[in-house]
Amino acid sequence: MIAVLGTGLLGTGFARALVKKGEVVHVWNRTPAKARAIEGATAFDDPADAARGASRVHVVVSDDAAVDGVLARLPPGVTIYDHSTTSTAGARTRTARTDLPYLHAPVFMGPQNALESTGLMLVSGERARVAAATPLLAPMTGKLVDLGERSDAAACFKLMGNLFLMAFTTGIADMLGLAKALGIPGPEAAALFEHFNPATTIGARAKRMTDGAFANPSWELAMARKDARLVQAEVDLAGIELALLPAIAARMDRYLAEGLGNADWTVIARDFVAR
């Protein structure tokens, strides 16, 4: 029997996928109706009851406090796989516990990924524990990535990935703000990505940054800053406030003041990658 504690969108997907694979599944959620809505699973009003007798427990809740609240109610010795996005300190503390075998395995998934066993799952920690978990976790995802022995590495990479998701989503929002300032309807502006795919440059830009290869620029910092001024002028005329551009411009100005105008504009990452 497998228990899924936390049946929000992601947990519901996991539970339904396990049921579909023929597993006996117990579920719990702090809103009981959500757990009871999962056909083929047995719902419980207490996480301890749901977990009792389980071969493993999957925790899918909102934050550190929710994870700790669930773990405090579980019987000793049950194996925990935690897919929640949490702090690195929380991941380290929970991994160090001896009463509840714990492994942090956060995911880059939506509900449909969880249901279809696609998407990406991260894992890290003590080697024997990860090895034992791998054949159990791998069928739940399209790709399971082992980030090594550091107990909080999965938490670290999950937070880094989420930051990037926030940044590029806000970038799209800012682009739509500029489009509004320019009198271009949002759907027409979004159609730019049918022809222009900046995602293909991510790997090369990240490598240039981590290598510190800021000479031989493809886009000089001074020219990038000029373009930022052009954008700012357009939105200012329309009374539109952008979220990212002012911060980017301030970072650019800092490095321009150091005489780096002819460097590749990725030099704005210099202080984070300097060896």
Image (cartoon, rainbow, N blue to C red):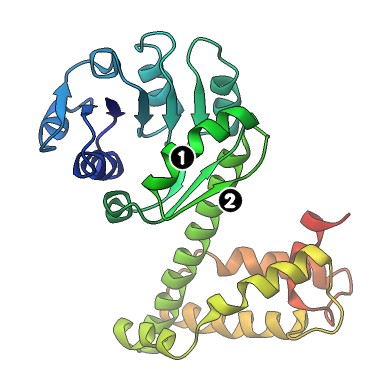
Label 2 crowd bin: few (<14), some (14–19), many (20+), radius 10 Å: few
Query: Disc 2 vs disc 1: which is toward the camera?
Result: 1
Quadrant housing the N terminus: top left
Q: Is residue 63 visible?
A: yes
Camera-side residue: 80 or 261?
80
Locate residue 207: give its quadrant.
Answer: bottom right
Task: Pinpoint residue 11: horizontal percent, then vertical percent.
Answer: 29, 39
Give neighbour class at mark 1: few <14, some 14-19, many 20+ (Cα, 10 Å).
few
| Residue drawn at x 32%, y 55% as measured from the top left | 113
What residue would you read off at disc 1?
135
Left or right of 125 on screen, residue 118:
left
Q: Looking at the image, which residue is at 49% across and 34% down?
A: 133
Q: CA distance from mark 2 to mark 1?
A: 26 Å
Q: Position of residue 99 (x, y in %)?
A: 50, 9
User: Residue 242, percent across and down?
Assistant: 48, 68
Residue labelled with disc 2: 160
Looking at the image, tell me whether mark 2 or mark 1 is earlier in sequence order.
1
In the image, residue 42 above or below residue 113: above
In this rendering, the count of numbered labels is 2
Three-letter code, disc 2: Met
Residue 240 point in image, percent of width and height:
43, 73
